[in-house]
Image: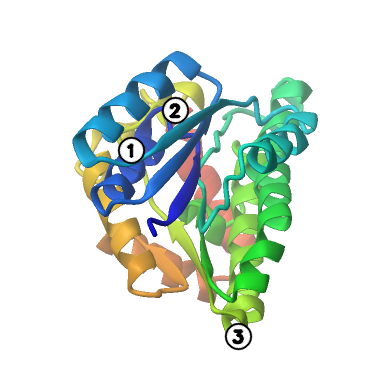
Amino acid sequence: MNKTVLITGASSGIGKELAKLFAGDHCNLVLVARRVDVLDELAAELSEKNGIKAKVFGVDLTQPSEISDLHSELKKHKLHVDVLVNNAGFGASGKFAEIDFRTQLDQINVNISALTELTYRLVPAMVKRKSGGIMNIASVAAFSPGPYMAVYYATKAYVLSLSSALANELGDAGIQVTCVCPGPTKTGFGERANVAKGSIFNSPLVMDVGPVAKQAYDGFNAGEDLVVIGVQNKILALASRITPFKLSAYVTRKFNHKII
């Protein structure tokens, strides 16, 4: 029987590319995002091309109540999720005190709360079946404090920490947990975070979304707990782990000041 994979933020970027990869391996899909029209097109395309089933749910992950509604819909349609891909997320740049608080809270709701609740609601069934998988998309930002994107960096640090803990905790139950940490990628993230005009998003360090998704997918299938994408990002992640937080924050502040 084909596995069923739920992907949040599936309408574009890494989520969309991951949907294509899972569909190519004959997995059925549950596609979640706000833009239902885009999801419908993607579902139709992948279903026809790969002979799989794809169900679409329009969900605004900034609204906590919609997570429980989604879970109810999954039970209503008898959709048993084998793999959860927590891909949805966004950032905002600027001075902490000057970014609209609603935007700050929305980052927490999408990047942390929705990810945590979906995982919490779907893991018990995986534990009962003694099989399943979780892929959480974090960021290389998870390894450092991030002045001028303070909340975003903090949310990704949470994702990394939670993923690492769950990988250890759920491994004995046959559940694979993989945290993926990409660097700057050609998606809509830069525009939404208002950093697209910065030097880093106009340099050779920016990766195309296809290869990023493929490395994430391959790492998950290989059973890796942590996938840091890109040689430069691997070096940065390693350096951040041995650098005092105060110095790391200083360096990141200088870097972020150039991209906002």
| Left-right relation of 4 to 90 | left
SS under mark 1: helix
Q: Residue 63, image x and y in percent?
A: 74, 27
Mark 1 and mark 2 in contact (Cβ < 8 Å)? yes
**In terms of sequence position, does the residue under pointer 1 or pointer 3 come before the other?**
3
The quarter in which the N terminus is drawn is bottom left
Q: Residue furthest top?
A: 37
Location of residue 162 by image quarter: bottom right
Residue sitting at 58 percent across and 62 percent down? 160
Please tell me whether mark 3 or mark 2 is closer to you in this view.
Answer: 3
SS under mark 3: helix
**In terms of sequence position, does the residue under pointer 2 or pointer 1 come before the other?**
2
On the question of residue 150 being in view, the answer is no
Mark 3 and mark 1 in contact (Cβ < 8 Å)? no
Q: Nearer the viewer, residue 98 or 216?
A: 216
* Residue picked out by circle 3: 172
* Residue picked out by circle 2: 195
SS under mark 2: loop
| Left-right relation of 258 to 177 | left
Q: Which mark is residue 200?
A: 1
Q: How is the image coloured?
A: rainbow
Q: Amino acid at mark 2?
A: Val
Q: Residue 41, image x and y in percent?
A: 34, 20
Residue sitting at 57 percent across and 45 percent down? 79
Q: Nearer the viewer, residue 145 or 110?
A: 110
Measure the C-alpha gap from mark 2 to mark 1.
Answer: 9 Å
**In terms of sequence position, does the residue under pointer 3 or pointer 2 come before the other?**
3
